[in-house]
Structure formats: C-alpha cells, structure tokens
Image (cartoon, helix red, strand yellow):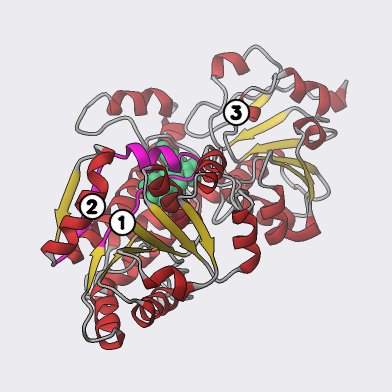
Amino acid sequence: MKIAVAGTGYVGLVTGVCLAEMGHDVTCLDIEEEKIALLEEGRSPIYEPGLEPLLKRNLHNGRLHFSTNLKLGYRNAQIVFITVGTPEKPDGSADLEYIYGAASDIANSIENDVIVCTKSTVPVGTNDQIKHIMNSTKPPNLKVEVVANPEFLREGSAIIDFLYGDRIVIGSDSEWASGVVEQLFIPFKIPIMKTDIRSAEMIKYASNAFLATKISFINEIASICEKVEANIEEVANGIGGDHRIGRSFLKAGIGYGGSCFPKDANALVQLAGNVEHPFELLEAVIKVNNHQHSLPVKKAKELIGSLRGKKVAVLGLSFKPDTDDVREAASLTIVNDLLEEGAVITAYDPVAVRNAQNILGDRIEYTTEIQTALLEAELAIIATEWDQIKHTPLDFFLLYMKEPIIIDGRNCYPLEKIEQYPLTYISIGRPAIIHEYRKSSL
Ligand code: UDX
C-alpha cells in the first residue's frame, strides 16, 4: 500500500519504519528540514532501541522515504497516518492545532480517495471534526474517511510494541475504511478490535488512565507499608498473584512521568469536566503522583536536616530507563526541590543529559559516569532504574561518597544486599536501613 505519515515524532517514526518493514511504500513527512535531512541519512533524531537498524534497512531497500514536501507526500497516498503532537494547553486540555492543520493539508493535496488514520492521542470527538474539516476542503469528486487508530507504544520498546502489541483498535463509521485498515494490520497477527470512532478515542485515554491509577494505587499502599512496617514488594507480589489484578504496573516508586500518562490523565480530567462529570478518582491519581515526585527531597530533609551547601548525586534523569526522554520526569522535580533547598547537584544519566540540560540549564553539573556524580556527595538520590545504576557495585557508594546515604526512588537493590554494607538506605514502601556509621566521624 502507498502510505503517508504526517509528523516524524516518536510515534510517526516508529509507525513509518514498521509499516515499511512490513513491505509498504511509506513516506514520512515533517516540516522540520533538519530532522528530515538527518532521517534521510538513516540517523534517528530520538533514542529508541532497535529503531535505527530498521530505518537504515528500509531506506536502502527503497520502501521508506522522508520529505518536507507535504503535498507530494499526501497526493497519492491510500492511507495517511496522522501522528503529529497534541501538546498540553495551560488548562490541561489537548492542543489540536497541528491535528487540524494536517487534516486541511491532506484535504488540499489529495488526488485520489484517502483514509485518514489518526494515531495521535486526541479527545473524544476530534476525529469527527477532522472528517468535517476534510469534507469541507477536499475536491468534491474524492472520498475521504476517518479511522481512529490509537497507539499503545511504550518508549524504549516501541518497535516491539508496534510489531507484537496486545491489540489493534480500529474505530470508524465507514466499513470501507475499517476494512482497508484491517487488511493493513492482519499480517501483524495481533488481535484486532473494531469499534466506533468515539469508543476508539476513549480506549486510549481510559487505558493510560487505568495504568496511571494502578501506579498511584500501589504508591499509596507503599506509603502505608512504610508506616506499618510492611514491605511493598511482598505486598505487590501477593496482590499481583490474583490474575484479576495482574503483576504489571504495580512497581512502587516516585511516580510516573513521560509524554503520555501525565498529559493524558490531565486531558481526561478536562474532558470529563467538559461533560459535567468531575473525574474525582483520576484527580486523586494525579495528586498522588505529584506527591511521589516530591518524596525523595522530603525524605532527605527528614533524614539529614538542612541540605544547604550539601553535595547531592542525582542518579538518572530520564522518566524511565532506555529512553532519553525527560518530559515530566520525577528527576526534574527532585532537582528543582534540591536547588530550592540550596543543595549542589551533580546528575548522572547515560543518555538523557542533553535533554535534561535543555530544561534545567547550567544550574547543576552533569555527567555520564556514576562515579563522578558520587564523588564527595553527601547524599545520592536514585530517580531512574537504569541497569547501569542497578549494576553499580555497592562498594562505589562507600568509596566515592563523603557520606554513604542513598534515597532510592525506584527500589533498585534488594534489602538483603544493602544490609551487607554500612550504607544508610531509604527506599519506597520498604523498611529503612539506617547506619550510624559516618565517614566524617572517623
Ligand atoms: C505509556 C503507555 O505504557 C503506552 O501504552 C502509551 O501509548 C504511552 O504511555 P511510556 O510513557 O513509554 O508508555 O512508559 P511506561 O513504560 O508505560 O511507563 C510510564 C511511567 O510509569 C514511567 O515513568 C514508569 O517509571 C512508571 N511506572 C511504570 C511505575 O512507576 N510503575 C510501574 O509499575 C510501571
């Protein structure tokens, strides 16, 4: 099939590359010339494991193209995927400017019937609006249909999720359009669910809201565990053993971040409010998550008092491992809270330093080496469970730090292992390990 992809962000790029890999002729479009030039050289502007080799392969075999010429890209496409961004507006709702812009660009360019497939996360009713815009702009002799086809890609495993996902949702009121899109996805051998447009739009928001709810729920249980001297890992394992609950997304920590959960949760609260249904449960989920982000510095102050002038190592900047994305990362709250307390920070991350620097600037030091961050630090806060951090020998904390005190926001180490070292170790939902040993008193 001849496919165009509008927007070469994270979702667009993964969609384009994977559809080319499945044998289709794909043109990915974007207005950013630098990005397109980079992609034409086979280089990915985002850090996503496994993306670049597939990008290179499909560029070389001629199935994948990149262009800034929107008209040329849309002109003869049979399906156009809309994968442009829907940034958050100050009131929490989704900004649909790029979505509607893409819809009118497509309608102005097409020379044959086309199916527009929206992958961007959009509020319920948006696809109807896309259809309306396109029908009022397109040449009268051509047919345009709209399909809501939400994505469920996790950063860091997006290629695997696209090729081997749990389900594909196709929401349309046109049998022709949903039939064509179904044919496109049948070779993936993933269960396909056909729905009406609005239900497909809602499925995306409800999925992310539910997963966010699971995380805030387990984090609340973790806080209670700390007070009653229970261990959240035993508890999560115990409740996850019930297949109705399941084990996934029950990892307690300092809360969720990223480009989806925070934005989509806010947008769903906004959407519910618009139809006069205050979504109190989801509002509480968001509140709990904000609280989790601020836990490490609260715990640090409780433990060591003033942080003024203290050197602190922040380990991990990305919102989760295997990505360079720092959007809504807990690390950002931690750094800002520490700066407010007057601490001096060196932050470590294997890949996210550049993105963090764009947000946090030169108020802190950055490093891609854990030992450099730990050197002379009086406190280490773990914000991301990178393998590099999990596999750091615990001796390093003793050797390099001025005081071996760790606040682990991601429960990276088994308590039994920590107990073998003279470390003070505070984690989430597990008993604190306090060592009176202080290097400075030796
Ligand atoms: C998410 C959804 O999983 C995906 O389906 C959707 O399309 C986009 O949003 P992503 O943001 O890449 O994907 O990350 P995910 O792996 O879902 O993790 C989100 C956040 O939740 C991370 O900050 C992670 O650290 C946190 N998390 C996840 C927990 O705190 N505990 C868990 O048990 C799971």
Q: Residue furthest left?
A: 175
User: In front: 227, or 307?
Assistant: 307
The magenta span reads 148-173
Which corner quadrant holds the N terminus? bottom left
The span from disc 2 to disc 3 (Cα, nearest Å) is 33 Å
Q: Is mark 1 within 8 Å of ligand 1?
A: yes
Q: Residue 150 — which label?
A: 1
Task: State yes or no: residue 165 in magenta.
Answer: yes
Q: Residue furthest front?
A: 62
What's under tag 3, amino acid-wise?
Answer: Asp
- Foreground mark, 1 or 3, reads 1
Give how far across and how far down residue 244 sits, in percent: 19, 33
The residue carrying mark 2 is: 169
What's under tag 2, amino acid-wise?
Answer: Val
Q: Is mark 2 within 8 Å of ligand 1?
A: no
Which residue is found at the position 28% from the left and 73% from the top? 112
Marks 2/3 in contact by CB < 8 Å: the verdict is no
Can residue 313 be seen by looking at this rendering?
A: yes
Marks 1/2 in contact by CB < 8 Å: the verdict is yes
Q: Is residue 68 left or right of residue 181?
A: right
Q: Residue 387 — which label?
A: 3
Q: Quadrant of ligand 1?
A: top left
- Foreground mark, 2 or 3, reads 2
Classed neighbour count for the residue bearing mark 3: other residues with Cα under 10 Å, few (<14), some (14–19), many (≥20): few
